[in-house]
Every structure is written in C-alpha cells, then in structure tokens.
Image (cartoon, rainbow, N blue to C red):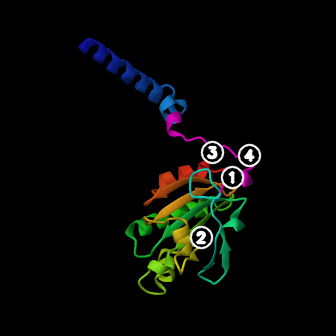
C-alpha cells in the first residue's frame, strides 16, 4: 500500500512539473483556475423577480448624492455590481478602493457599479458623502435613506454584493467584503 501511495504521489508531482514547465500558460492547472463566462439566458424577461441566482434583480429608485434619480432598470444593457454598504463598516471601506479601480478599468466595457449607501444606518447625516469624498469614489452612489431597498434586498451583512448581467439577471450574491481578484473574475464572467 505504501508503494502505491508513493507511486501515485510521484505521478502527480511529475504531472504538475510538466504542466508548469512544458505546457506553461496552456496547462491544466492554469485553465482550471479560469472561470467560464456565464451563458446568456434566452428570454430573461420571463424569469421571476427575486434575490436568487437566476432571478431578475428587483428594480428600485433612489436619489444619488447630487439628488438625481437612480433606477436599477436604467442599467439594463450593462453588467452591474450592485453593492450595499455603510461608511461605519470596516470591510466596506476595505473593498471600496478595489471597486473604484475596477470601475475605472471596465466602465468603457458595458460595466457599472451601483453602490447603495444604507443611509438609515449612518450615525450622522453627511457621513456617506464624506466617505465618498475621502476615498475619491466616482461610481454611482444612491442613498437608501429609509432602508427600504436594503430590506427588499434582504441585506443582513455589510457589505452585500450582487453581480447582475446585462439583462438584469442576478448571477452571484456575496455577503461580506470582496477582494479585487474575486471581483474582477466575476465582472469578466458577466455577459
């Protein structure tokens, strides 16, 4: 039995070495790490509206920091990272610079970020605006002053993010902070 396990370990090691040296970037390990793009859904308007993967994201209308109306449905035709956050939330603060970087990288490729501030959870009025200015955020920041949209989206953890494709279909939901690598992989997967 020991000889069998040793032989199996040697074979796996040799395959790994061949994969990394001879095959290089075309190797099995590299390909396994790459995620496939989500397939486009036929007739997405026939999907139910809800919060599960494969549902149409519920529409909402809020005002942004400048008082302009922001509707999620206005972003149809673009992939969207819908994020719910608070200025008092350390994980929210940690992920925002990554969001800004990726927004600037992909905004010309039919991608947008809608980062809903859960204003009803802020300690002081103006906290969200100060946070946005401090971090130099340039993507859309709607204010959920009454907490209605946060409740509709069942936000229980801060931050909460939804990756929504160009047809308005939820493809992924993440509770908690996202790192840049994960965000970028999901952005690239959205049709």
**Which residue bears the numbered disc 1?**
47
Q: Earlier in the sequence, mark 2 or mark 1?
A: 1
Q: To which residue does mark 3 refer? A: 38
Q: Say which quarter of the image contains residue 95.
A: bottom left
Label 4 Cα neighbours within 10 Å, binned few <14 / some 14-19 / many ≥20: few
State the SS at label 1.
loop
Q: Which mark is residue 184?
A: none
Q: Give the residue drawn at x 53%, y 80%.
A: 146
44 in the magenta segment: yes
Image position, residue 37 (x, y; %):
62, 44
| Within-10-Å neighbours for mark 3: few <14, some 14–19, many 20+ | few
Q: Which numbered disc flags the more N-terminal residue, 3 or 1?
A: 3
Q: Report how far apart the C-alphas of labels 2 and 3 lie in the structure.
A: 24 Å
The mark lying in front, picked from 2 and 3, is 3
Q: Nearer the viewer, residue 88 or 120?
A: 120
The answer to which quarter of the image holds residue 140 is bottom right
| Mark 2 vs mark 1, CA separation in Å | 28 Å
Q: Return the residue at label 2.
A: 139
Q: Mark 2 or mark 3: which comes first in sequence?
A: 3
Q: Residues within 10 Å of mark 2 (few under 14, many from 20)?
A: some
Q: Position of residue 74 (x, y in %)?
A: 71, 68
- On residue 42, the disc is 4
**Quadrant location of the N terminus?**
top left
Residue 133 percent coordinates (x, y) = 51, 80
Crowding around mark 1 (Cα neighbors within 10 Å: few <14, some 14 to 19, many 20+) is some
Q: Dominant secondary structure of the magenta stretch? A: loop
Residue found farthest to the bottom: 125
Magenta region, residue range: 31-48
């Amino acid at each position: 039995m020991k000889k069998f396990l040793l032989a199996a370990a040697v074979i796996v090691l040799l395959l790994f070495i061949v994969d990394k040296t001879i095959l290089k970037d075309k190797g099995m390990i590299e390909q396994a790490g790459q995620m496939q793009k989500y397939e486009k859904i036929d007739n997405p308007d026939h999907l139910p509206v809800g919060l599960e993967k494969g549902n149409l994201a519920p529409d909402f209308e809020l005002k942004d920091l400048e008082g302009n109306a922001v509707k999620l449905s206005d972003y149809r035709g673009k992939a969207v990272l819908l994020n719910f956050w608070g200025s008092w939330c350390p994980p929210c603060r940690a992920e925002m610079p990554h969001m800004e970087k990726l927004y600037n990288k992909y905004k010309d490729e039919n991608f947008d970020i809608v980062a809903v501030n859960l204003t009803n959870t802020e300690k002081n009025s103006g906290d969200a605006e100060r946070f946005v200015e401090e971090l130099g955020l340039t993507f859309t920041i709607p204010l959920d002053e009454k907490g209605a949209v946060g409740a509709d989206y069942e936000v229980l953890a801060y931050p909460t993010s939804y990756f929504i494709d160009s047809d308005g279909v939820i493809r992924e939901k993440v509770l908690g902070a996202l790192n840049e690598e994960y965000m970028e992989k999901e952005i690239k997967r959205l049709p």
